[in-house]
Amino acid sequence: MADPVPFLEGQGWVQIGEVLLAFALSSLIGLERQLRGKSAGLRTQALVGTASALMLLVSKYGFFDVLSAGTVVLDPSRVAAQIVTGVGFLGAGLILTRRGVVRGLTTAAAVWLTAAVGMAAAAGLWLLALVVTALYFVSVSGYTAIIRALPSNRERAVAVEVFYADGRGVLR
């Protein structure tokens, strides 16, 4: 059913619902990150998911006024692809390497997933958005318990403190 006012095309209750769903699901993911004290928490995740939803809706509905048969062809998947690229860049900024330890990978992946949830919600794929949000919680909560129970094969960092008496031995 088309909106009765032409300039409101693509700005009806369905699209508002899609943006609100993206906001709610992104906020849930962000709340979990916030409670764990991670760098990209509630506000960041909510903004990324909601912005992704809006960008996808702009891609889907924002160009009807410039389309004309046979002259302008629109590929709405191009904006979705650019969201993936842009959010990947944002996630790369969240990954830190310090003294050989990589931190922020899960946070970066959560930002990327939040963008995908926002895009799915905006595309009208609400069931997929809900399922992926649930799978996020399985990954960060359920898998954490499993990982802690597994035997660790990683090398452990060990601090060694050496005391040397000045003037004794070869070294000064």
Image (spheres, rainbow, N blue to C red):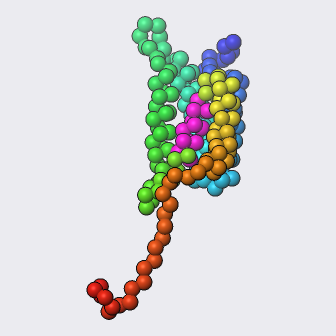
- Can residue 16 be seen here? The reply is no
The main secondary structure of the magenta stretch is helix
Position of residue 55 measured from the top left corner of the image (x, y, whole percent)? 55, 31
Q: Quadrant of the C terminus?
A: bottom left
Work out whether 98 lies above or below 146: below
Position of residue 168 measured from the top left corner of the image (x, y, whole percent)? 33, 91
- Residue 108: say if magenta: yes
Work out whether 53 lies above or below 36: above
Position of residue 156 measured from the top left corner of the image (x, y, whole percent)? 50, 60
- Can residue 135 be seen here? The reply is yes
* Number of marks present in the image shown: 0
Q: Quadrant of residue 98?
A: bottom left
Question: Which of the two residues, 53 or 41, is positioned nearer the viewer here?
Answer: 41
Work out whether 64 lies above or below 136: above
Q: Residue at x 67, y 16 (%)?
A: 3
Q: Residue at x 56, y 27 (%)?
A: 56
- Residue 148: say if magenta: no
Q: Residue at x 68, y 30 (%)?
A: 131
Question: Which of the two residues, 89 or 162, is positioned nearer the viewer here?
Answer: 162
In this view, the residue farthest toward the top is: 70
In this view, the residue farthest toward the bottom is: 167
- Does 139 sit left or right of 160 as displayed? right
**Which segment did they paint magenta?**
107-119
- Does 81 sit left or right of 1 as displayed? left
Q: Quadrant of residue 122?
A: top right
Work out whether 170 lies above or below 8: below
Q: Residue at x 50, y 39 (%)?
A: 87
In this view, the residue farthest toward the left is: 170
- Does 32 sit left or right of 91 as displayed? right
Q: Quadrant of the N terminus?
A: top right
Position of residue 102 measured from the top left corner of the image (x, y, whole percent)? 47, 53
Question: Which of the two residues, 170 or 59, is positioned nearer the viewer here?
Answer: 170
